[in-house]
Image (tube, rainbow, N blue to C red):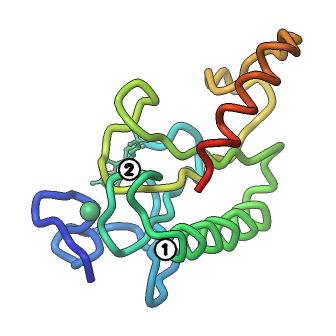
Amino acid sequence: MITDSACIFCKIVAGDIPCFKLWEDERTLAFMDINPANPGHALAIAKNHAPDIFSLPPADLAAAAATAQRVALALRAVLAPAGINLVQANGPAAAQSVPHLHIHILPRRADDGLALNWEPIPGDMAAIGELAARVRAAIV
Ligand code: 5GP
Ligand code: ZN
């Protein structure tokens, strides 16, 4: 397993720091967030250490996504929230505070005031199309 001795989530994977565990399998772990934005706020991680979406191998990302889905289904069964957001941050400007890739599973209530949502404002189609061409060309 790839691990970083300075990483708080690697310490949770190793059992050196406790967590409220929800699910564990060979590749992944899910546990409650200790600073819940809403009741039921949970995190799904790959056990292998990788800071972000740029560095996590696709198989680990797929496994973490499957675990997030399992937890979302359980949260829906237990809490019947009005909605659930999956949130995954990369880099300080995206508000990532723990550099071990994690997927937030975040139950939502109507009018819970969490500042995650934005109003859709129609874009400039020419600019969108031009950017799409540049990104398409960069996909490997
Ligand atoms: P980020 O800001 O990187 O998207 O999310 C990191 C999350 O990890 C935060 O929601 C924070 O509350 C949570 N967190 C930080 N340290 C610990 C910890 O030691 N245990 C648990 N369970 N969650 C943690
Ligand atoms: Zn780590």
User: Answer yes or no: do the residues labelled 2 and 1 have beta carbons within 8 Å?
Assistant: no
| Marking on residue 34 | 2
Looking at the rendered image, the quarter that the C terminus falls into is bottom right
Ligand 2 is located in which of the four quadrants?
Answer: bottom left
| SS label for mark 2 | loop
Q: Which amino acid does label 1 sit on?
A: Asp
Which class describes the residues within 10 Å of circle 1: few (<14), some (14-19), or many (20+)?
Answer: some
Q: How many marks?
A: 2
Which class describes the residues within 10 Å of circle 2: few (<14), some (14-19), or many (20+)?
Answer: few
| Marking on residue 18 | none
Percent position of residue 21, x then y: 43, 73
Mark 2 close to ligand 1, CB under 8 Å: yes
At 24% from the left and 67% from the top, the residue drawn is 10
Give above or below for 12 relative to 90. below
| SS label for mark 1 | helix
Give above or below for 138 relative to 48. above
Compare residues 53 and 113 and report the one nearer the observer. Answer: 53
User: Left or right: where does residue 131 sit relative to residue 15?
Assistant: right
Label 2 vs label 1, nearer the camera: 1
Percent position of residue 75, x then y: 70, 62
**Quarter occupied by residue 15:** bottom left
Q: Which amino acid does label 2 sit on?
A: Ile
Q: Residues under labels 2 and 1: Cα distance?
A: 24 Å
User: Left or right: where does residue 68 sit relative to residue 15?
Assistant: right
At 84% from the left and 12% from the top, the residue drawn is 123
The extreme left residue here reads 5
Identify the residue under disc 1: 60
At 48% from the left and 43% from the top, the residue drawn is 36
The extreme front residue here reads 137
At 81% from the left and 55% from the top, the residue drawn is 80
Give above or below for 125 relative to 23. above
